[in-house]
Every structure is written in C-alpha cells, then in structure tokens.
Image (cartoon, rainbow, N blue to C red):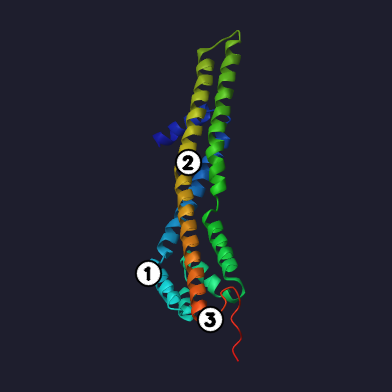
Amino acid sequence: MMLANILVEYFERGGPMMWPMLLTALVTVAVVGERTVWWVREGLRRNPAGLEKVFAALEAGDVHTAQQLTKDAADPVLRMIDHGLSRRHASLPGALQVAAGAELQKAGRFLTVLDTLVTLAPLLGLLGTVAGIFRTFLSIGDVELAVERVTGGIGEALIATMCGLAIAIVALIPFNYFTRKVAQLHFALESAATNVEAMIAAARKREGKTPDLPDPPSS
C-alpha cells in the first residue's frame, strides 16, 4: 500500500506528460507479454526430429511420406514444407516463399510497435523535462518566488526523464531478443526451403523428369 502511494505521488509530481508515458508503458507491457507467450508456444511446437524425417523421406524420393509427415504440423518450418509440397507441380519455390513469408509475418507481429515505443518513450521524457524546466523558469521570473515551485519544476523534469528512459530500456531488451528470434526463424525457413528444392530436383532428375515442369499425367 505504501509503495502504491509513493508511485501515485511521483506520478502526480511528474507533470502532465506522465499520462502519455503511462499509456506507452501499458502498451509496452502488453506487447512484450503477448510476444513472450507467442514465442514460448512456438518453441514448444518446434519439431527438429520430424524435420529430419521429412528430409530423409525427400532424399529417398518418397514425397508422399514427406507430405504425410508435414500434414497438420504445428512446426512453422514443417508448415512451410507442407504448403510447398502440396503445390510442387505448379511452383515449388513460389509456394515455399509465400509460406515462409506468412510465417515470418506472424513472427514479426508488433515488432514495429515495440520499435516505435523504444524511440517514443525517451522523447516523451525529454518533452516532460523541457516542460519542467520551463515551469521552473517561469517561477524564477515571478515576484512571489517560492522554493516549492522551483523544486517542483526540477522534480517534474527529473521524474519525466527517468520514466522515459526506464520505459525505453524495458522495451529495448525484449525488442532485440524478438528481432533475433525472427532472424533465426528466417534462417531456418530459408535453409529448409533450399534443402526441399534441392531434394525434389534430385528426385525428379533420378526419375528422368524436368525439375521445373509439372509431372506428366499418368496414362
């Protein structure tokens, strides 16, 4: 209870810029929480053993078994492969690229918002600092100068700066972490797509088919 009272007191002393910074902090917490839950869930869905089985089936030329292994998969890499294999007769590279783009779009969701918050929070703190110093300047020019008014303006400037920097730091660390996770997923998708294309091309070559053309209809 005492801590809550202290926080409310400092919030009120921080001036009007504390309200937009409070909104920024709430959005930051919401985005970080949502992305953390999403990445934890995606981490549990990853299936490296299943991916190796798919590669083994494709290397052996057994596309049907590979499709069965990737069907209804939760792993984003396996979902991409399933999307590509189901459309391999039309355009395998294009299908893989579209599926990978969809996975990366889901992985990078709200990263732009988080990046904006990292930049916005210190700017709001700086604006609050300028407002507090300006208030102090006006108090110095007043005939009835009160120490409380001067220290209040300085306190407002310091509190605004501190809160802006704190929000930016809290947002920056998870932003860099999530960006790194997206880059890792991008590499995994790209590597898997390259392997699938090479294995399908090799399988078609062994069968005497042109890799880039659809399979001829069976008689």
Q: Earlier in the sequence, mark 1 or mark 2?
A: 1
Give the side of residue 219 with respect to residue 174, left or right: right
Give the side of residue 70 with respect to residue 97, left or right: left
Q: Secondary structure at mark 2?
A: helix
Badges 2 and 3: C-beta atoms under 8 Å apart? no
Q: Secondary structure at mark 3?
A: loop
At 55% from the left edge and 41% from the top edge, which residue is drawn? Answer: 117
Q: Nearer the viewer, residue 11 or 89?
A: 89
- Give the numbered dot on residue 70: none
Type of residue at label 2? Leu
Q: CA distance from mark 1 to mark 2?
A: 34 Å
> Which residue is disc 1 drawn over?
49
The image shows residue 12 at horizontal and vertical percentages of: 52, 29
Q: Quadrant of residue 217?
A: bottom right
Image quadrant containing the N terminus:
top left
Toward the left, the furthest residue is: 49
> Which residue is disc 2 drawn over?
172
> Which callout, 2 or 3, points to the residue nearer the camera?
3
- Give the numbered dot on residue 208: 3
**Image position of 145 with respect to 108: above or below:** above
